[in-house]
Image: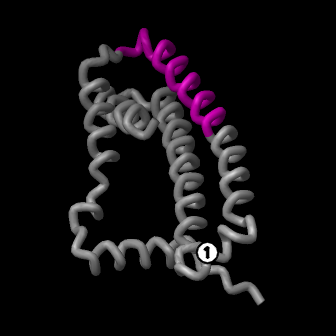
Amino acid sequence: MDNRISFFELLRQCLIEDLRDKRYISLIPWFLAICIGIGFVAAYYLPISIFNRSDYLVLITGLIAAQGIMLGMSTNAIQHVVQNISSPGFSTYLKECNILQYYLFFIQYFQYVGIIALIALIISAIILISCTDVFIVKIALALSFGLV
């Protein structure tokens, strides 16, 4: 019988625990907001026209390649973390403290964030190729810069 808890159930439990401990400030994704804000500032000052879009497409392609490499390396690192978690003494300790599922949740969380960033980069590359509205292109670039 499979008694694993789903990712979204563990996310809900983490958020409830933060609320119970009255850590409301931890529910706000400050780091994500700061990174996307920096991305918007950078994209605002980029001179975008039809003639230099290929330069930005090369930049986005490089970011996609870098994000793919980081996902590959993080998968290898996660394999070692899971190997350490599964060692008999440590896994028993984590089960006794009832925190094993949180360790496994954060591993999944980092993988999902990396995949979402990669998808956002691919979408912004498609927008950069197909869209003629400069404002939309700047928003796509800002989000992709912020997520990487």
**Rendered image quadrant of residue 38:** top left
Q: Which residue is mark 1?
A: 93
- Span highlighted in magenta in the image: 49-70
| Helix, strand or loop for the magenta stretch, by majority | helix
Residue nearest the viewer, comparing 61 with 14: 14
- Which residue: 51% across, 40% down? 123
Q: Residue at x 73, y 66 (%)?
A: 86
Quick one: label 1, few (<14), some, or many (20+) residues within 10 Å? few
Judging from the image, the colouring scheme is one colour
The reply, left or right, for residue 147 in relation to residue 35 is right
Residue occupying image coordinates x 53% and y 70%: 102
Residue 51 in percent (x, y) is at 42, 9
Outermost residue, right side: 1
Q: Residue furthest top?
A: 51
Does the magenta run of residues contain 68? yes
Q: Using the image, determine if residue 125 lies above or below residue 83.
A: above
Residue 121 is situated, as x and y percent measured from the top left of the image, at: 51, 36
- Residue 118 in the image: x percent, y percent? 56, 41
Give the residue at x 53% y 74%.
99
Displayed quadrant of residue 108: bottom right
- Quadrant housing residue 24: bottom left
Check disc 1 and give the amino acid type.
Tyr
- Whether residue 60 is situated above or below residue 140 in the rendered picture: above
